[in-house]
Amino acid sequence: MTLWDGLAEAFRLLLRGDPYLLDVLRRTALISGLATGVALAVGLPAGYALARGRWPGRTLLLAAVHTGMGLPPIVVGLVIYLLLARSGPFGDLGWLYTPQAMVLAQVVIATPLVVSFSTASFQSLPQELDDLLRVLGAGPAARCWLLAREARLGLLAAVMAGFGAVVSEVGAALTVGGNLDGSTRVLTTAIVLEAARGEYARAIAFGAILLLLALAANLALTAAQQRER
Amino acid sequence: MEVHIAGLAVRRGRQTVLSVASLRIGSGRVTVVLGPNGAGKSTLLRAVAGLERCSGEVRFDGTRQRPRLAMAFQRPVFLRGTVRSNLWLALRLAGVPVADREARIAEAAEALGIAGLLERPARRLSAGEAQRANLARALALRAPLTLLDEPLAGIDGPARRELLGALPAVLRAGGGTVIAVTHDPGEAALLADDLVILLGGRVHAAGPASAILAAPPDAETASFLGWDVIPAEGGVWAVAPGALSVGNGEVRFTLVAERLTVVGGLPAVAGRVAGVPCVARLQGGPPPSLGEPVTVAAPRAAARWFPAGR
């Protein structure tokens, strides 16, 4: 059966330390990890501002963020493709079919998730905590940092949601990355390629390894999260 | 630090929940803002702290520049970590030099009886312990202006009495200006140099505590302070708590006796004067028969007359 063959193949590839697999695996972790990191750097302060601010348009923006959580990666990929294409407004960057383009697309996909989860985490803290820090003279950056440490259980969930979304998406990676061997091929696009070739066992093998990567990342984050309780 | 509030108004939707035309908080004094729940006390404190959106202005020693404040909220909140680390962070944010922090923590912990709790996780404290740690954190800062919202909330029984005994000296030790908020007139009387009576979002009285407690300026203030407010022809009488006794006196009323009771360890009779529930002490004579009218009276000095229509 192809499914078992696929799992056996996954084992073989991992045990053998297959250079092609390791190359794709490393690139996947790097691109998605970097995208999650950037999304966190943008999303955390934005989440704090949305949670604590009282400014006009806040509700609208929050609704837009929640909507952004459901953005189809293929749509994100298309828009970024059009922006980065040679004739597009940012064509001069020469980013199309590069890892940079993939990171950019994945940042767009992950940021709404991170913002949404961090807004909820910050709002779960008592208002007085923010007030107290404010009265003591802490500026916005210091308050955001101190409260992020308080809300880290929820914020780790934000990281997991963001990483899980980008590591498993294929539409944007394919559209803006182009699935070039040795430069933009990641696990999901490798699966697409193997499946198209009719190499179903190898496709399943890459799928299983993708799940393992996600599991390893989540295991590390969950262990950190639960230790903090 | 002197605080001057002018034309302050806080609105929630269309409703004005707090309106203070002019209020001066004396430098180096303990001012207690006293009023029932929902009177706007916490809102006033938050407006002074700059945490409330409001119109009007608050000046600190004549400037609009808000100084570093110490504040204890009604609900004690702490960051993760021990009581000590929470106090340390507050001192660090407030710019207290590293060399002074340990001494400040030790001093505040001693004053509020939490020296034994410093290494405990701040979030695992009981309500009373948390409230004391909350006060210690605010007082350790020795800020020029300290704001305390219901400093004795959540503390009951002997612990409350003990803390209430210690607080007046502790609050004055720093030499800064203190604004505290409470709903309890007894607590206010023990803590305050000056009183601000806040009823329904408006200041009814402001001035030295002894003057306001001895002679409330209006019937609402008197009623809130526990005086018996008794309607009479052309106005109302307000009689100081515990001033009524059975027998003749300068200001006389007719009480319909309902039951015998004990007030302050002495026998008394409870009943109604003009429909208002009142209690009068018995002066050694025979107890009045229940359901019958009996004459009760208060010394003139313990009663205030407020003409109607004012």
Image: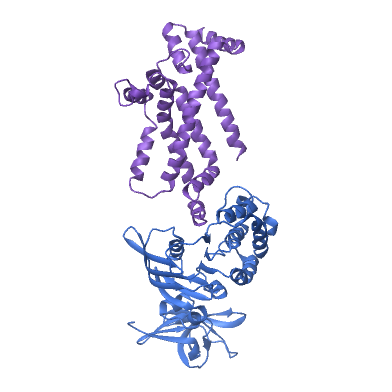
Q: Can residue B166 be seen by looking at this rendering?
A: yes
Looking at the colours in the rendered structure, which chain would you say is drawn in blue?
Answer: B
Query: Chain A shown in which color?
Result: purple
Q: Nearer the viewer, residue B270 or B216?
A: B216
Quadrant where the image shows the C terminus of chain B: bottom left
Decide: is A112 above or below A169: below
Q: Quadrant of residue A14?
A: top right
Give the x, y percent position of residue B223: 45, 77
Task: Report the side of A13 relative to A45 (left or right).
Answer: right
What residue occupies the far left of the structure in this picture? A87
Decide: is A216 above or below B9: above
What residue occupies the far right of the structure in this picture? B116
Give the x, y percent position of residue B95: 57, 56
Q: Nearer the viewer, residue A65 or A180?
A: A180
For the image shown, how many numbered marks are present on the structure?
0
Question: Which residue appears at 50% of the width and 57% of the height?
Answer: A135
Give the x, y percent position of residue A186: 47, 17
What residue occupies the far front of the structure in this picture? A92
Task: Report the side of B155 relative to A180 (left or right).
Answer: right
Question: Which residue appears at 51% of the width and 38% of the height?
Answer: A155
Give the x, y percent position of residue B174: 60, 68
